[in-house]
Image (cartoon, rainbow, N blue to C red):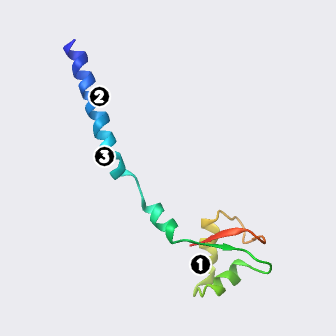
Amino acid sequence: MDKLKNIIYTISLVLIFSIFTTPYLVNTSDKGTQSLDTTYKVVKGDTLWSIGSNFGVENISEFVFHVKEVNNLSESTILVDQIIIIP
């Protein structure tokens, strides 16, 4: 009976410890970067290159790479009325 009681106390202690420490172990770095991102609605004639130019980006090829990466685009093709995230 004492052995069962010790096991229950140990499990309870681990659960309580987990509940209080989990918020400190969660990676919150993604939340900070997403709040800095801008969205852009594509209009007729837009390209990723022209959007980068309109935003005053110095290294447009790097900009295009990051926009494709953030938006999960395999190609540089974008569509009218598409909303893209500008990192």
The residue depicted at 62 percent of the width and 83 percent of the height is: 60
Q: CA distance from mark 3 to mark 1?
A: 39 Å
Taking the image as shown, residue 72 lies to the left or right of residue 77, namely left
- Camera-nearest label, 1 or 2: 2
User: For residue 21, which numbered disc appears in the image?
Assistant: 3
The disc labelled 3 sits on which kind of residue?
Thr
Of callouts 2 and 3, the N-terminal one? 2
What is the x, y in percent for residue 66? Answer: 59, 72
Disc 2 marks which residue?
A: 11
What kind of element bears circle 3? helix
Q: CA distance from mark 1 to mark 2?
A: 51 Å
Q: Quadrant of the N terminus?
A: top left
Crowding near the residue tagged with mark 2, few <14, some 14–19, many ≥20 C-alpha atoms within 10 Å: few
Q: CA distance from mark 2 to mark 3?
A: 15 Å
Crowding near the residue tagged with mark 1, few <14, some 14–19, many ≥20 C-alpha atoms within 10 Å: few
Disc 1 marks which residue?
A: 62
The disc labelled 2 sits on which kind of residue?
Ile
Is residue 28 or residue 61 the one in the foreground? 28
